[in-house]
Image (cartoon, grey):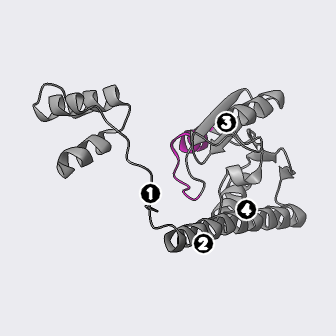
Amino acid sequence: MVYGYARVSTKKQQKNGNSLEDQVRLLTDNGCTEIFSDAYTGTKMDRPEFNRLLNRVKPGDTIVVTKLDRFARTANDGAQQVQDLVAAGVNVHVLNMGKADNTPMGKLMVHILFAFAEFERDMIYERTQNGRAFKRETDPNYEEGRKRKSLDNDILQACLDGRISAAECAAKLGVCKKTIYNRIAAG
């Protein structure tokens, strides 16, 4: 069986051919019969759809990803995951690299590419932190985090009065339940 795995860090990730749609199209074009996809950070190895894929795959199957960093964004985690899959008899095919295998060259390529992925992630984080520090120093109106979403007070009041549940309130307002609980706690 040929499985595909697609991952983005956020559902809004659409640039550089990395959207879930772009990845799924490439995986389908390359013979994947079943595709698992996550909108989950690559810094965590515990991802719902990735775990489902790992539970399904067996020796002789192939996992295809568009880029090696779809597995993980840290060199140690990603390289270990690929090595574990290859050792278990699972073929790993990375579309922009080729097949990952147990040869010395295959192992070297996996480690080098994961090291670059981790470096890239660290550089993005560093640039983001520098940008925030610059804004804090130069913009007196700068506030950390996302702007607070405006919510319909009538719906929130219905939740406070017990006429609707927090889950119903969240669904009507298009936010998660935690946002509702935070707003209620804030008054």
Looking at the rendering, the stretch of residues picked out in magenta corresponds to 43-56
Position of 29 with respect to 56 (left or right) is right
Position of 86 with respect to 42 (left or right) is right
What amino acid does circle 2 point to? Asn
* Image height of 115 relative to 63, above or below: below
Q: Quadrant of the N terminus?
A: top right
Position of 154 with respect to 21 (left or right) is left
Distance between the alpha carbons at the discs numbered 3 and 4: 18 Å
Residue designated by label 4: 117
Q: Taken as a whole, is the magenta stretch helix, strand or loop?
A: helix
> Measuring 77% from the left and 45% from the top, which residue is drawn there?
16
* Image height of 134 relative to 153, above or below: below
Closer to the chain start, of discs 2 and 4, is 4
User: Callout 4: few (<14), some (14-19), or many (20+) C-alpha neighbours within 10 Å?
Assistant: many
User: Callout 3: few (<14), some (14-19), or many (20+) C-alpha neighbours within 10 Å?
Assistant: many
Closer to the chain start, of discs 2 and 1, is 2
Disc number at residue 49? none
- Figure quadrant of residue 152: top left
Closer to the chain start, of discs 4 and 1, is 4
Residue designated by label 3: 20
Disc number at residue 130? 2
Residue designated by label 1: 145
- Say which of marks 3 and 1 sits in front: 1
- Figure quadrant of residue 107: bottom right
Distance between the alpha carbons at the discs numbered 3 and 1: 25 Å
